[in-house]
Amino acid sequence: MAGLERLVFGTIRRYRLLEDGDVVYVAVSGGKDSAAALWTLRRFLEVYPMDVRITAFHIDLGFSTSGETLSVVEALASRADVDLEVVHVGDFGVDVERAAAALRRPVCSVCGAVKRYLMNRVPRERGATKVATGHHMDDVLVNFIKNLAGNHLDWTSKMGPKLVGTGKLLTKIRPLYEASSDEISGYVRAMGLPVAKCPCPYTMGSCSYAKETLEMARALSVRPGSVRTGHISTYLAIRSGLDKMEEGTPGIKRRLVRGIHELARRMGTPSSRPPAQCSVCGEPSSGQICAFCRIRMASQRGIGKATEKI
Ligand SMILES: [Zn+2]
């Protein structure tokens, strides 16, 4: 058994991520992290058979790279011998790039809101009990630090390996919670899993492009912030700091992420209070109209004048 599998199997058992009767939709983007999440969940069920059904779930965001990404995802699902369900944002009347321009928001922020919405609504409507994502230890640590720095302390309660849903919110599980990005890369290479070169043309932190930038920054011993700006530079700067800590104190990242889980547990799940419903689509929403419906409306109209919060 590969080292990463031992680690992930421990996470699945320790936090009871799978239960008999589960129908788990694994969100696959075409990237390495979600490929590893799908593969390790499948391997877990081979080693410890349970009454759990796994389906790969892909959201086609309508980007220029979508065709290549879709063929990679199809190859992955076929090799894992699981069903694949694909939804196209265009079928929901959404155009991510157009909406981002109209709302004057970064494409990454609009894309994230669209994915969060569809990853909850579609699997639930198709009978899923849980959604699994490829978020790993480095994502959790970076997001925790960003939230702490931004005084978004409430978000910490959502940062455990299992976020129990309520009402229309599905339970989310993160089987790679205690695995590092480097461990996942090594596993995906060793297993020869099909992975898209860059599923996202906008280079978010999970993208291989961002990863290469990080490697380049390390090799040149330059501050990652001086290589790129915006989302990536923040992600890389924090990642780079964490990796330096890990070099000096091996195992510190794993201990930190377990501490974050304990903190999230002590804070309690925010979803114990059912959220309000969107007056347009009826899905959970913090405002009267949910972010997805506002994005859908913005997709239909021209370029806006003011920045709109979503
Ligand atoms: Zn809505």
Image (tube, rainbow, N blue to C red):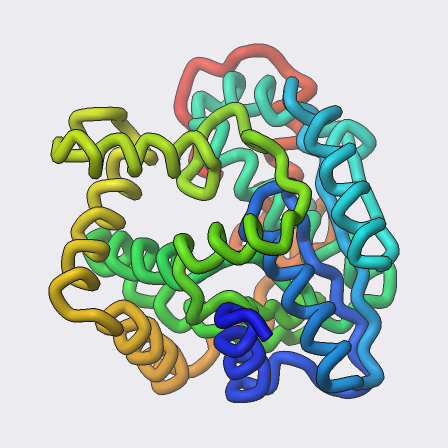
- Residue 100 versus residue 110 in the image, above or below: above
Looking at the image, residue 270 sits to the left or right of residue 50; the answer is: left
> Looking at this view, is 239 or 123 the one in front?
239
**Quadrant hosting residue 152:** bottom left
Residue 279, percent from left and from top: 69, 49
Q: Say which quarter of the image contains residue 217.
A: top left
Q: Position of residue 102 (x, y in %)?
A: 53, 18
* x, y percent for residue 251: 26, 73
Q: Using the image, determine if residue 20 lies above or below residue 193.
A: below
Q: Quadrant of residue 53?
A: bottom right
- The residue closer to the viewer here, 60 or 71, is 71
Q: Quadrant of the N terminus?
A: bottom right
Name the side, left or right, on which 161 lies relative to 26.
Answer: left
- 111 is higher (above) or lower (below) than 9: above
Examine the rendering and report whether any part of residue 285 can be seen: no
Residue 148 sits above or below residue 17 on the image: above
Residue drawn 62% across the image and 73% down it = 165
What residue lies at 56% left-to-right and 36% top-to-bottom? 111
Q: Residue at x 78, y 87 (%)?
A: 20
Q: Is residue 264 visible?
A: yes
- Image position of 38 (left or right of 309): right
Task: Identify the residue at the far top of this view.
Answer: 302
* Count of marks, rendered view: 0
Frontmost residue, 228 versus 231: 228
Q: Residue 244, how many percent across, how many down?
A: 16, 55
Q: What residue is drawn where x is 86% and y is 66%?
A: 127
